[in-house]
Amino acid sequence: MLKRAREIGNIIRNSKEIHIVSHIDADGITAGAIALQTLKRLGKEHSIEFVKQLDNQVLEKLGNENHELVWFTDLGSNISTNYSDINKIITDHHKCPKNSDYNFHLNPHLFGLDGSTEISGAGTTYLVSKTIDKNNMDLSSLAIVGACGDLQNRRYGKLHGLNRKILSDGEKIGVISSKMDIQFFGRETRPVYKLLQFSSDPLIPGISGRESSCISFLQETGIKMKDGDNWRRWVDLSKDERKKIISNISQILLTKGFGHKITKRIIGEIYILSQEKEGTELHDVKEYATLLNSTARYGQYDVGLEVCLGDRDKYLKEALNLLRGHRHNLVEGLRFAKEEGIFKRDYLQFFHAGTGIRDTIVGIVANMLLNSEETSNTLPLIGFADKGNNEVKASARATQELVDKGLDLSSAMRKAAKQLDGVGGGHNIAAGATIPKGKEEEFLDILEQEIKTQLSSSV
Ligand code: C5P
Ligand code: C5P
Ligand code: ZN
C-alpha cells in the first residue's frame, strides 16, 4: 500500500492543477481537508467540491471541466475502471471490484485489508499525504477523526490495522493521545445525565432514552450532578465517580442478561486531539466527527472544511449552530421512524420515513435505531427516505454478528439497486443505495432474497 501511495504521490507532484472531489460525511470532509492541505503546502493550484454520491451527472460535469487531475477522496472506488477520459487518482476505502487495481487507486480492499475497520477514506488520503512530505504527519489527527466518524473503532473497541499506525504517527508528534474510557457520546460537552440518556451502543435498559431515570440513577449512585450553576460533564467527574457509574451500568446490563461481550463495549479506547481546548466539541475525536457531520450532511461543506483547516472563529461558530440543528433532527428522526413503524420480514426489517427524515441522515438514524429496543438485533435494518426527483434513498445497517455470519450489505444493496436501475454500495456492515420511487417493495423483495442467500451459503 505504501508503494501505491508513493506512486500516487508522484502523480500529484507531476501535476500543476488538481481538483478534489470528496464525500459529504465526516470521513469525506477530513479526507478532503487532508488532500487540500497537502496541495496547498505543495503550492499546487487546487479546488474542491463535495458530492452525495458519484453519479453520471457528477462524472459528466467533471469530464467537461477538463481538470488536469481529479483526486477522488472517500469515494470513487467504483469508477476506477470506467471514465478513462478523466485523469484521476483515488484514495478510498469502499468495496471495489478486483479488476480496479490500478496505480492511481489506493484502496485497502485491493490489498486484502478490510475497508470498514482498518483504514478510512481520510486514512488512505493521509498515507499519500505522508509519502509526499513527512511534515504532513500533523494531518494524522484528521485521519483519526475520519476513521472514528465512520465508526471504525467500534468493532474492537479501539482502532485497528493501519488506523493504529496512523494513530501512532499522531501520538509521536503530539497531536493525538488515547486512553481507555467510557464509549458514550459527549464525554467533554454534555451533562452526565444527558450522556447516559443518549447512550445507544450498548443500550442500557431502563436508562437510555429516559431522562428522569438517568437523574435518579446518578442520585442513587451518589454522583453530584451540578457544580454551582454548571452541569457536571463526564470529564469533570473524579476517577472514583466514573468507576462507580461504569460499575453500576455493567451491573444493570449483566443482571438483564446482556453478557460480558456486550457489557465490555461500554469501555474502549477514546481519542483526544491534544492541541484542541478541553471541554470543546473539537477535543474528543467522536464529538469532532459529529460536528463535521452537522455541516456537510446539510450542504454546508465549506463550514466543516474550514474548521478542519484550522478556523476557530466564524466557521466554528457556524458549525456549532448547525450542530444544534443536527441533534434536533436526529432526535426528531428517531421519534418519526418509531412512529411510522419498523416492519419485520424474515431476513430484514425496515422503516420508510418519506420526507420525514433527510436522505443524508437516514443512515445515522438507522444506525441509532439498530441499537434500540424497537428493532431486532438479529436482522439488518433498512431505512428509506425520499430524495426528491422521484428517487428514494435506502440506508442499510447491520451488526458485526451478522457480518460474521456472511452478510455483505454492500454487495446485496448494489445488486438489488442495479436490478431496478439504481446504484448502491458501501461496506459489509453499512451500505446505501438510490432507487426509483415506488420500487421500494420490489427492492426489499430482491434484497431479502440476496441476504437469505448470503446467510445460508456461508454456513
Ligand atoms: O461513506 P462511508 O464509508 O464514509 O461511511 C461508512 C458508514 O458505515 C458510516 O455511516 C458508518 O456509520 C457506518 N459503519 C457502521 N458500523 C461500523 C462501521 C461503519 O455503521 N462498524
Ligand atoms: O448513505 P449511507 O450512510 O447509508 O451509506 C452507507 C455507506 O454506503 C457509506 O459508506 C456510503 O458511502 C456507501 N454508499 C455507496 N453507494 C451508494 C450509497 C451509499 O457506496 N449509492
Ligand atoms: Zn468513509
Image: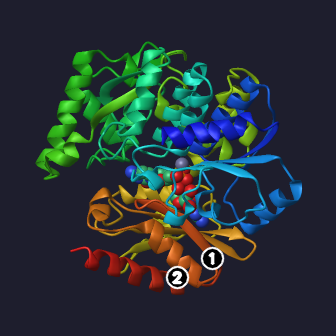
- Residue drawn at x 61%, y 37% is 30
Whether the residue carrying mark 2 lies under 8 Å from ligand 2 is answered with no
The amino acid at mark 2 is Phe
Residue 324 seen in the figure: no
Q: In this picture, is 169 found above or below 203?
A: above
Q: Look at the numbered disc 2 and give the secondary structure of its residue.
A: helix
Q: Residues within 10 Å of mark 1 (few under 14, many from 20)?
A: some
Q: Nearer the viewer, residue 135 or 219?
A: 135
Q: In this picture, is 342 found above or below 102?
A: below
Q: Label 1 belongs to which residue?
A: 422
Q: Nearer the viewer, residue 250 or 260?
A: 260
Whether the residue carrying mark 1 lies under 8 Å from ligand 2 is answered with yes
43 sits to left or right of 405: right
Q: Residues within 10 Å of mark 2 (few under 14, many from 20)?
A: many
229 sits to left or right of 20: left
Query: Between disc 2 and disc 1, whose residue precedes?
Result: 1
Q: In this picture, is 205 found above or below 63?
A: above
* Image spot of residue 244 (x, y percent): 20, 25
Residue 387 seen in the figure: yes
Q: Nearer the viewer, residue 201 or 132?
A: 132
Q: Quadrant of the C terminus?
A: bottom left
- Residue drawn at x 22%, y 48% is 262
223 sits to left or right of 443: left
**Disc sitting over residue 443 in the figure:** 2
